[in-house]
Image (tube, grey):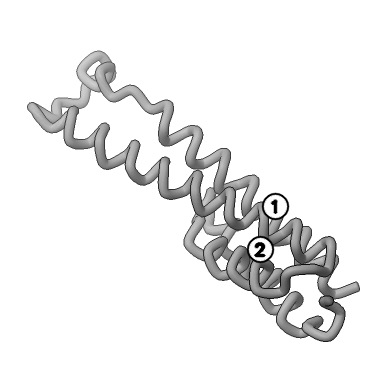
Amino acid sequence: MLSLIGGVFILIAGVIGLVTGALLLSVDLSDLTSWGLNVGGLVDTLESIIRACGAIFAILGIIALLGGYAGIRRKWFGLAIAGGVLGLFVVGPYGIASLLSLIGLILVAVARKDFD
């Protein structure tokens, strides 16, 4: 039962990672001057950095989703642990994804004997 709850927590962290990655990938900084922010010629650099972070968050979210699925199915213990560990790096709003991933990782690790 612990692996199921841990898998759900890791799965939720993965969804948060995908949403965060999608939001960062869709950012358009060309409107900064209309908002009153003057960043000079750094717009292209900032967009590149934000898009790279979005891609990283999306990839980590996908792996966390797969790990959460593995935890729910009680198969592939290594993938469940990897998803939990990589889900720690998906911060999300207020760090909730990292917290959920940490709790899920602990629950999955404690329920090691439940896996095939």
Residue at x 72% of width, y 59% of height: 68
Q: Give residue 54's position: percent from left, percent from top.
A: 41, 41
Tell how many labels: 2
Residue at x 14% of width, y 30% of height: 39
Instruction: Indicate whether 115 appears above or below 65.
Output: below
Label 1: which residue? 12
Query: Quarter holding the N terminus?
Result: bottom right
Residue at x 26% of width, y 41% of height: 49
Residue count near mark 1 (Cα–Cα under 10 Å), binned few <14, some 14–19, many ≥20: many
The foreground one among 38 and 104 is 104
Label 2: which residue? 100
* Contact, mark 2 vs mark 1 (Cβ under 8 Å): yes
Please, what secondary structure does the residue beneath circle 2 have? Answer: helix
Residue at x 59% of width, y 69% of height: 82
Residue type indicated by callout 2: Leu
Q: Give residue 30's position: percent from left, percent from top.
A: 25, 18
Instruction: Tell which residue pokes out farthest to the left in this image.
Output: 41
The quadrant where residue 42 appears: top left
Residue type indicated by callout 1: Ile
Q: Give residue 33's position: percent from left, percent from top.
A: 20, 18
